[in-house]
Image (cartoon, helix red, strand yellow):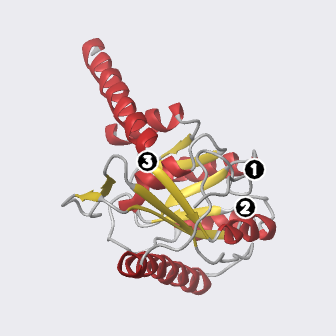
Amino acid sequence: MKSQTLKQQAICWIAYLFTRLFHASYRYRWYDLENYEAACASSQSGHPVIACWHQNALPSVLAHAHRRLGIVVSRSFDGEIISSVAARFGIASARGSSHRGGLEALRDIIKLIKSGHEAGITVDGPTGPLHKVKPGVISIASLTGSTVLPFLAVGLRSWHFSSWDKFRLPKPFTRIICIYGTPIPVARRIDKDEQARLAFQLEEALMMLEQKVSTWRAQGLPYAAVHRGLRPSVREKNV
């Protein structure tokens, strides 16, 4: 049992080292940062619930490295690797999923939000279906008085995997395009019909961001502000 624990620790460290090297090589380009600022202003908690697709989880998390971010991670060993790597980038984890430990994860992510963290949620995870928003992100926003903020982070050059989520791993030295979508306010008390409507609205917003990047690939990228590891409101202006 002890050797297995040592093996797991070694895997976590190797995963971190590779992630650190990839992150150091990426060039992040940020767009529509005013949407982030609007989401903060409209959230009773002062922080948005940032929503992304599971296939973009890695660049989405790395784009928010060393900020007060909390993410929901499953209790599987894959989740243990993600949680371990995230912690070394200053990101907290709430462990659990809809299959195991869901209530504990919900409670923990709410605690993180109330303690001043933003929340990052992969809205179609951990097992899909692909690009279908599950209601958890709306519940978290409603319970904390937070605005949901659609977010896309994707590499201009990526490896594509054949997993259920069609996972994208940005290649080293590529640009990572980071876009905040239009904020989606969520009331404190909502019924199931309103929850479903908001989930569908978020689904459409995330797909619109995907379409926007596809258009930019064909037409060329516009000007963007650049920053690495800072809050979007504290950014360096560059081309």
Q: Earlier in the sequence, mark 3 or mark 1?
A: 3
Residue that mark 2 sits on: 144
Q: Secondary structure at mark 3?
A: loop
Residue 75 coordinates in the image, percent (x, y): 40, 42
- Residue found at the very far front of the displayed protein: 239
CB atoms of marks 2 and 3 within 8 Å = no
Residue that mark 1 sits on: 114
Give the amino acid at mark 2: Thr
Residue density around tag 3, few if under 14, some if 14–19, many if 20 or more, within 10 Å: many
- Residue found at the very far top of the displayed protein: 2
Q: Nearer the viewer, residue 61 or 74?
A: 61
Residue 225 coordinates in the image, percent (x, y): 62, 61
Against 167, residue 203 (above or below) is below
Residue 178 coordinates in the image, percent (x, y): 52, 63
Which residue occupies 58% across, 79% down?
195
Which residue occupies 22% across, 59% down?
163
- Residue 195's mark? none
Residue density around tag 2, few if under 14, some if 14–19, many if 20 or more, within 10 Å: many
Q: Secondary structure at mark 2?
A: helix
Which residue occupies 51% across, 71% down?
135
Q: Is residue 92 left or right of residue 209?
A: right
CB atoms of marks 2 and 1 within 8 Å = yes
Q: Nearer the viewer, residue 224 or 45?
A: 224
Identify the image quadrant of residue 214.
Answer: bottom left
Residue 138 coordinates in the image, percent (x, y): 59, 70
- Residue 26's mark? 3
Alpha carbon separation for disc pair 2 and 1 = 7 Å
Q: Earlier in the sequence, mark 2 or mark 1?
A: 1
Give the amino acid at mark 3: Tyr
Alpha carbon separation for disc pair 3 and 1 = 31 Å
Q: Nearer the viewer, residue 72 or 168?
A: 168
Q: Earlier in the sequence, mark 2 or mark 3?
A: 3
